[in-house]
Amino acid sequence: MRVTALRADVSDIDGWWDTVSEAVQQEILTGQGALARLARGYLTAHARAEGTSVRPAVVEPNPEQVATSLRVTGPVAFRTHMALSGSAEASVRVMASQLQGAAERLVLEGDRATTMRTFATNESMAGWRRTGGGGSCPFCLMLIGRGGVYSRRTVTFEAHDRCRCSAEPLYRRGEEPPEVRRLQREWREATAGTTGAGAVAAWRTFLAAQGRTQ
């Protein structure tokens, strides 16, 4: 996606987008479908390992949503940055970065939507925990550190561009894994004496000092 964007015709950005958008969108939808199938297989095997069974949800891709998101992070982002900077070269780089981030998020939606829809429709699942995919940002690490507290009555799974997090369904409440316990301990130490926005700022400072920021 990034390579395609960097080759954009800046003299006719909308014409260029009309030429490449269909292929780009199809690539995203294909990736979504592949990850959705993998997620259904994982959910079935995961439930079996927990001594139960689930019927994974089938979530159909939303071509209109994909097309809109890509247009906003593609030609719209290019024109917005051009109006601010006047630099076609810089605007192409910004567009390429935003398109790449959006593309990754949209592809991963196949996994995330399948998991969360399955969770919503299977009472055998007690909750879920957020898991990271490497290089998690401070905000995501904060959410991962909360462990298996998420339920149907709390929040839905949210992801930003370039986020590699996913949701792990839970069939019973139990001890958190070592990585979660470590994050919880670090959070308590880093945010001692702070609350709210101050705690989040202290957490970011703590991670930055260790070089653990994106």
Image (cartoon, helix red, strand yellow):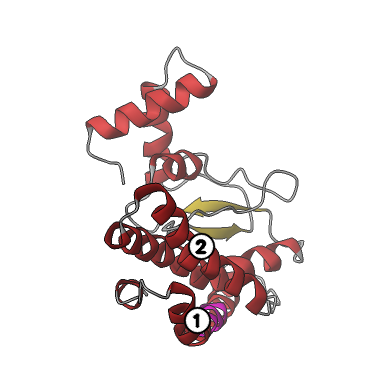
Q: Is residue 81 visible?
A: yes
Check disc 2 and report its element: helix, strand or loop.
Answer: helix
Residue type at mark 1 is Ser
The 10 Å Cα crowd at callout 1, few under 14, some 14 to 19, many 20 or more, is some
The 10 Å Cα crowd at callout 2, few under 14, some 14 to 19, many 20 or more, is some
- Looking at the rendering, the stretch of residues picked out in magenta corresponds to 28-36
Where, by quadrant of the figure, is residue 67 drawn? bottom right
Residue type at mark 2 is Val
In the drawing, what numbered circle is on residue 21?
1
Estimate the x, y position of residue 140 in percent, counting from the top left: 45, 45
Viewer-nearest residue: 163 or 71: 71
Q: Is residue 201 left or right of residue 166?
A: left
Estimate the x, y position of residue 113 in percent, counting from the top left: 62, 67
- Picture residue at 41% right of the left edge, 58% below the top: 162
Check disc 1 and report its element: helix, strand or loop.
Answer: helix
**Which image quarter holds the N terminus?**
bottom left
In the drawing, what numbered circle is on residue 76?
2
- Picture residue at 22% right of the left edge, 34% below the top: 210
Viewer-nearest residue: 6 or 152: 6
